[in-house]
Amino acid sequence: MTDLQGLVLQTNRAGVKKLRAQTGQMLRALIEMQIVDAAGLIHRVQTAALRQGIASETVVLPDRRFDVSAHQVGPTALLWRLDVARTADNDAAGPATVYPTLTIGRGGTVLWMNAAARELAGGRVRSLEDLITDPPLRPGQTHRVGTDGTAQDFVINVHPAGAGREEVVFVPKPTPEPSLPEDMGFETLPVPLLKVSPQGDVTNANRCARDLLHADAERDRSLSDLMEGLGRSIPDWLADAAAGKGLGRSEFLRLTRPEREIFVQVTLTRVVEDGKVLLVAVLNDATELKSLEAQFVQSQKMQAIGQLAGGVAHDFNNLLTAISGHCDLLLLRHDPGDPEYGDLVQIHQNANRAAALVGQLLAFSRKQTLRPERLELRDILSDLTHLLNRLVGEKIALDLRQHPALPPIRADKRQLEQVIMNLVVNARDAMSKGGTILIETDHRILNTPLNQGRAHVPAGAYVVVRVQDDGSGIAADKLEKVFEPFYTTKRTGEGTGLGLSTVYGIVKQTGGFIFVDSTPGRGSVFTLMFPVCDDPVVEPIIAPEPPRPIPVRHGDGVVLLVEDEAPVRAFASRALAHRGFRVIEASTAEDALELLKDAELKVDVFVTDVVMPGLDGPSWVRKARQMRPEVPVVFMSGYAEDVFKSQGARIEASAFLAKPFSLTELTTIVNQQLAIQSAIERQTPVQ
C-alpha cells in the first residue's frame, strides 16, 4: 500500500519475499527492477484507479509478463498488486505465448501486424478502430475486440517504438471483473473500510471501521442497522451500486450511535471476490463538515428572520402610531370622570405595550435606534443592583463581583441595562427552587483572534460580563436555538421568546459578542464581550447659553406633511391642526414637490416619512431645499435612526422622530424646529 506520492506505507510477506519491498521505499524503485518505463506505468495505472476506483495494466516482455493493478482504498492511499509471471520455458527460442501485436504510425495507421494479430483480425486492417469495437484507445484498459463475428476482451498495452511509432500488444483478459486480492492488510489499514453485499449485509469490517461505527463484529451485520438518513432506501442504493450505477459518488449518512450524532461520507466501489460481486465502502468522518453546514444554514435562517422582524416591526409601528395617536385625540375630548375615559386609557396602555414588543423585534433585527456613549460598567452595574435584587425575589441571592480596574466601553446605557435585566430574569426563571445568580466582570486582552462557534472575535482589549446561574440548564439540542425570536424553553404562557433574541440583537449592534455555555442540571453561563473604548475623554466645552427658543404661537406655522400611510397622515394632520398649525397634506414625495412649485405657497417646516414609494424622504427634501433652502425638516420612520442616516449624507436643520409617537411628541419637535429656525433668522444680519 502506498500514498499518492508512491511512498510504500505497508507491504505483505509476498512483497517482501519476491520483490524485497520495504516500508518507506518508493514504488518506482520496485517497478524499475522489472521494466524501464516505471514512471509512465505508475502514472497511467494510478490516474485510472483514482478515476474509476480500480485499474490494471500488463507489460509483456520476451521472458515474462509483468501485471500491475491498483485499488483505491481511501482519498490518500492505493493498494497495489505486482505479479511477475515467467514463461513455461525460458530456454526456448521465444516465449511460449505470443500475443497479438501490431505497430501503428502517428496517424493511427497500422504499419505491421504479427501472425497472431492477423489471425485475431481475420487478415490485415488499416487502422486500430477497425479492430476494437469501443474506441477511442485507452492504453492499459480493457477493450472489446471483434474477431470473425465474435467479440473478446483484451487489455491493450501501448509502448513507444521510436520514430513516432507505437507498438500495441493485445493481452487476453482472463476474467471480466477485477478481483480484490486476499486480505493484504485489510484489517490494519488506517482507513475505515467495509465489505458489503448488494443486499446490505456487512461481510467484513476492518478495525478502523468498527471503531468509527462502534459496531460489534458478530451482531451488527446489516448496513441499515448502522446508518440512516440517506433519503432513500439503503438496499436500493446498494443494488444500484452493484449494477454499476452511481459508483464514485459520495453519500452522507448518519450513524445510529445513540450517545452522539456522527455523520460519515460513504463512497462505494464494485469488486468481485471469489466470483461474487461485493461492494467496498470507504468511510470518512464528516461530522465536522455537517456541523459547519448546519451552522451556515442557521446563520442564513437568523439573517432571514432578522430581516422579516425588521419589516414587520416597521409596519406595526405605522399601525401603532395611528392607534395611539387617535387615542390621544380622544383623550383630549374626555375628562377623567367620563365613563369612556378608563377604556381609552386601557387602549393607550396596551398600545404602549405593543410598542415595547415591537422595540424588541427591532432590537433582534439590530434596527433600533441606539445612542452610544462612553460608559463605566462598574457604576452601571452598581446602580442596577438595587433593581435586580427586587426582580429576583427573596429565594434567590444576587452576587456581584466587579473587576477593580475596569476600562470604559461604548454602548447605549438604557439598552445595556435591558441586556443585564433580561439575562438576570432568565436566570431567575431557571431556578424555581432558589439559588444564586453571579454577575462577574473582567478585563481580558486577546493577543490573537478568538474563534468560538461561528463567532470570530478579533484581537484586542475587551470588557467581559458573565451572568451565571445554578438552575436547570439548557439541553444541548436546544442550545443553538436560544437566541432565535419566539423560541423559549419555558412553559406555554410564561415567556414571549424575545428576551434572549433582544439581548443578542443589542449586543451585536453594540459591536460586542455573546456566548452561552450550559450543563443540564447544573446551570448556564452567558458571557458578554464588549470592546474597550479607547476614545480620549473630551472635556466639555462651556459655551454661552443659547437663546431660549421662542414657542411658536398657535396658527403661526405652516406644515407640509408628507406620509404615504393614510391613518398616520390623518392623525398627524389632526394633531398639528389641534395645536394651531396650518397643515398641507401630500401622500407622495412627488405630490409635495409639485405643491412647492407654487412660489406664493409659504411653508415653515417639512414633516415627512423616510421610506415611501417613489422618492424617499431624504431624496425629495434635497430637491425641495434647492427651492427653499431655509425650511427645517422633521423625519419620521418606523425604522431606526441609523436606517435614516444610511439613506445619504446628513441633512442640515433636520430632526428625527421614531414611530410610534404621541401627539405631544409630534407637536413638540415641530415647535422646536420652528423655534430654532426663528432664532437663526433673528441672528442673520440684514444686507
Image: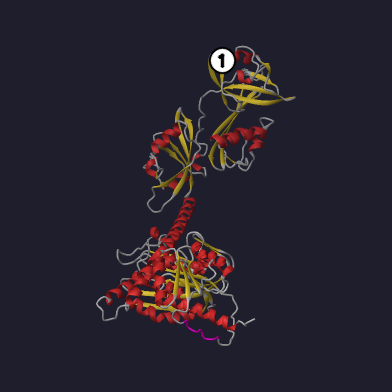
Is 257 magenta? The answer is: no
What residue did someone put label 1 on? 147
Q: In the displayed orientation, state which residue is furthest to the left.
A: 339
Q: Secondary structure at mark 1?
A: strand
Q: Is residue 36 visible?
A: yes
Q: Is residue 71 left or right of residue 497?
A: right
Q: How is the image coloured?
A: secondary structure
The secondary structure that most of the magenta stretch takes on is loop
Position of the N terminus, as image quadrant, is top right
Rendered position, 163 above or below 522: above
Q: How far across and how far down the image is residue 122, in percent? A: 60, 12
Rendered position, 396 above or below 203: below
Position of the C terminus, as image quadrant, is bottom right
Viewer-nearest residue: 340 or 400: 340
Q: Amino acid at mark 1?
A: Thr
- Residue at image location 56% in from the left, 23% down from the top: 134
Rendered position, 567 above or below 535: above
Rendered position, 634 above or below 135: below
- Residue at image location 57% in from the left, 73% down from the top: 652
Viewer-nearest residue: 431 or 660: 660
Viewer-nearest residue: 60 or 531: 531
- Residue at image location 75% in from the left, 24% down from the top: 163
Q: In the displayed orientation, state which residue is furthest to the front.
A: 600
Q: How far across and how far down the image is residue 110, in percent? A: 67, 18
Is 548 magenta? The answer is: yes
Q: How far across and how far down the image is residue 61, in percent? A: 66, 24
Magenta residues (range)? 546-552
The mark tally for this picture is: 1
